[in-house]
Image (spheres, rainbow, N blue to C red):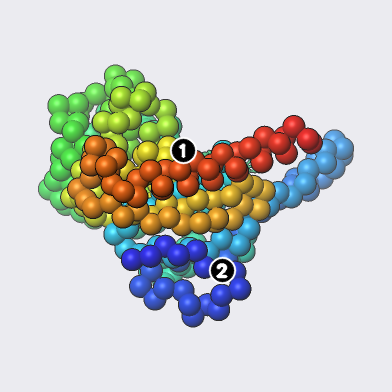
């Protein structure tokens, strides 16, 4: 199991043959507007290199967190893995096949929940299952929905609409919806970012429990060092943008199942935490300095 960043000069045959997801020399450019209307309106808009030459191999059943300063390109990378955003250069292989669009093999949990407001908890999850597996029997669909409502602790709230739920409950629906069609990889973009500290803590514990049970490959973006250390096997630290890269990949050696008290006692905990803090401080300070100077 490794998530070694692969140097851009490394020949292709050094990529891990067992990687479930292989990000190979991937760059992302957001092109400036070049349409006639923008030209006539005198609008100048430059191309923006968000990510430059990122390579990363992710083995199956690994929990990987991505951490980096705001605006560095974390969501951009995750969206390319999800197939929601084009890859400008390089390729992302999933089970050795290039990703060309979204697919049922990847489930996404969004920061802002992205639930259908007119549908109940149960209907939101059913909609995802029916979209991905229209041919499943009613019995199969019902079982998947029920199991996942139970898994995230929402039994009893099946008939509630999103506006009747707390933020934490909405995010539980998002997680159940992403898991209910059995994706091979769960992608989470700051899943707990909008929650208060206590709810966030509860949900992190839930995710740890669910991960123990399901052992799916997870790629999670987070701004929280403690969250990354509690949940991850590997932590990918990205540099600031533009042209963001992977700076380093940390291995998290804590045994599982984990809880906060146990990992806090682990001899490696404070060194890993200090390393992440200094990375984030350095990169964020450089962003601020660039903003002030120009
Ligand atoms: N559609 C777009 N068009 C142009 N630029 C974009 C677009 N989407 C993102 N960007 C730019 O790409 C860079 C990376 O954005 P991204 O949303 O991936 O950052 P992030 O690391 O997820 O940030 P945050 O932690 O704040 O969520 C930013 O500078 C952003 O302004
Ligand atoms: Mg983001």
The quarter of the image that holds ligand 1 is: top right
Residue 46's spot in the image, x, y percent?
Answer: 77, 46
- Quarter of the rendering occupied by the N terminus: bottom left
- Is the distance from the Cβ of mark 1 to the nearest ligand 1 atom less than 8 Å? yes
- Is the distance from the Cβ of mark 2 to the nearest ligand 1 atom less than 8 Å? no
Secondary structure of the residue carrying tag 2 is loop
Q: Residue at x 49, y 41 (%)?
A: 277
Whether residue 73 sits left or right of residue 209 in the image: it is: right
Residue 194's spot in the image, x, y percent?
Answer: 42, 28
Figure quadrant of residue 128: top left
Residue 188's spot in the image, x, y percent?
Answer: 39, 44
C-alpha span from label 1 to label 2: 25 Å
Q: Nearer the viewer, residue 62 or 285?
A: 285
In the rendered view, tell whether residue 101 sits above or below residue 159. below
Q: Residue at x 66, y 41 (%)?
A: 286
Badge number at residue 7: 2
Badge number at residue 223: 1
Q: Nearer the viewer, residue 266 or 117?
A: 266
Q: Nearer the viewer, residue 280 or 43?
A: 280
Whether residue 266 sits left or right of residue 7 in the image: it is: left
Q: Would you say residue 173 is visible in this rendering? A: no
Figure quadrant of residue 149: top left
Q: How many discs mark residues in the rendered view?
A: 2
Q: Residues within 10 Å of mark 2 (few under 14, many from 20)?
A: some
Secondary structure of the residue carrying tag 1 is loop
Labels 1 and 2 touching (C-beta < 8 A): no
Q: Would you say residue 140 is visible in this rendering? A: yes
Q: Of marks 1 and 2, which one's residue comes earlier in the chain?
A: 2
Residue 40's spot in the image, x, y percent?
Answer: 87, 39
Q: Nearer the viewer, residue 72 or 157?
A: 72
Q: Residue at x 43, y 55 (%)?
A: 250
């Amino acid at each position: 199991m490794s998530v070694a960043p692969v140097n851009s000069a490394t020949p292709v045959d050094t990529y891990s043959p067992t990687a479930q997801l292989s990000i190979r020399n991937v760059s992302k450019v957001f092109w400036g507007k070049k349409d006639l209307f923008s030209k006539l309106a005198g609008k100048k808009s430059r191309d923006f290199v968000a990510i430059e030459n990122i390579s990363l191999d992710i083995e199956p059943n690994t929990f990987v967190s991505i951490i980096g300063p705001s605006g560095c390109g974390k969501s951009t990378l995750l969206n390319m893995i999800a197939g929601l955003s084009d890859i400008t250069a390089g390729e992302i292989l999933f089970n050795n096949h290039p990703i060309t669009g979204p697919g049922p093999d990847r489930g996404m949990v969004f920061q802002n929940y992205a639930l259908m407001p007119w549908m109940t908890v149960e209907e939101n999850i059913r909609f995802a299952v029916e979209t991905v597996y229209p041919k499943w029997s009613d019995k199969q669909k019902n079982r998947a929905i029920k199991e996942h409502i139970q898994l995230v602790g929402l039994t009893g709230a099946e008939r509630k609409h999103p506006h009747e739920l707390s933020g934490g409950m909405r995010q539980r629906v998002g997680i159940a919806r992403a898991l209910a069609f059995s994706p091979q990889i769960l992608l989470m973009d700051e899943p707990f970012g909008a929650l208060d500290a206590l709810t966030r803590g509860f949900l992190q514990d839930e995710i740890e429990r669910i991960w123990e049970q399901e052992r799916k490959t997870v790629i999670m973006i987070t701004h929280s060092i403690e969250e990354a250390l509690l949940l991850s096997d590997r932590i990918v630290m990205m540099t600031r943008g533009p042209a963001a890269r992977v700076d380093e990949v940390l291995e998290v050696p804590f045994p599982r199942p984990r809880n906060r008290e146990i990992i806090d006692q682990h001899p490696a905990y404070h060194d890993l935490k200090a390393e992440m803090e200094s990375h984030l401080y350095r990169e964020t300070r450089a962003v601020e300095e660039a903003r002030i100077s120009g």
